[in-house]
């Protein structure tokens, strides 16, 4: 089985570091970037099985990043997460193709389970 490639997109360095650490321990290859513009650049340069994208970021927000990823690489699964969840945001994210929507705070185990679930049907 090939190693899954995950993109973490968050403007908070501590969140990027924690997520990257948890996911690397699970055996994933992780690329972490600080904003939506870097995320789009990364997606244009390489293929990711999954992107974990913060909803609220300066510049491009998580929904805009989701739309761009889905238009460029439709096979990439995207999980949107936020500390300020609302039903409207969740509905929009799912309707635009997000595999899941998580509200912070969530545990390391919830992150692992969400990622595993999102990658279950991934054929790469």
Image (tube, rainbow, N blue to C red):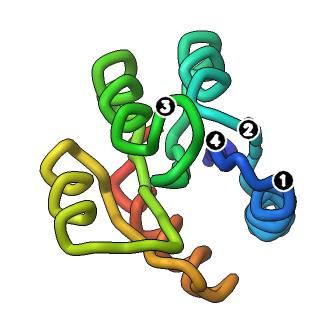
Q: Earlier in the sequence, mark 2 or mark 3?
A: 2
Q: Earlier in the sequence, mark 3 or mark 4?
A: 4
Write down the residue under mark 2: 34
Q: Position of residue 5 (x, y in %)?
A: 65, 40
What is the spatial separation of the Cα atoms under label 1 and label 4, in whole angstroms?
A: 14 Å
What is the spatial separation of the Cα atoms under label 2 and label 4, in whole angstroms?
A: 11 Å
Q: Earlier in the sequence, mark 2 or mark 1?
A: 1
What is the spatial separation of the Cα atoms under label 3 and label 4, in whole angstroms?
A: 16 Å
Q: Which mark is residue 60?
A: 3
Name the front one of labels 1 and 4.
Answer: 1
Label 3: few (<14), some or many (≥20) within 10 Å? Answer: some
Write down the residue under mark 1: 13
Q: Are marks 2 and 1 in contact (CB under 8 Å)?
A: yes
What is the spatial separation of the Cα atoms under label 2 and label 3, in whole angstroms?
A: 11 Å
What is the spatial separation of the Cα atoms under label 2 and label 1, in whole angstroms?
A: 7 Å
Q: Position of residue 104 (x, y in %)?
A: 55, 79
Label 4: few (<14), some or many (≥20) within 10 Å? Answer: many
């Amino acid at each position: 089985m090939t190693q899954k490639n995950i993109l973490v997109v968050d403007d908070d360095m501590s969140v990027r570091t924690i997520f990257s650490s948890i996911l690397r321990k699970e055996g994933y290859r992780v690329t972490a970037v600080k904003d939506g513009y870097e995320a789009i650049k990364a997606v244009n340069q390489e293929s990711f099985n999954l992107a974990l994208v913060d909803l609220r970021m300066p510049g491009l927000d998580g929904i805009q990043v989701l739309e761009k990823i889905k238009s460029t690489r439709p096979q990439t699964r995207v999980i949107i997460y936020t500390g300020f969840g609302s039903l409207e945001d969740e509905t929009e994210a799912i309707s635009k193709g997000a595999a899941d929507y998580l509200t912070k705070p969530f545990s390391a185990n919830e992150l692992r389970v969400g990622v595993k679930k999102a990658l279950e049907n991934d054929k790469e």
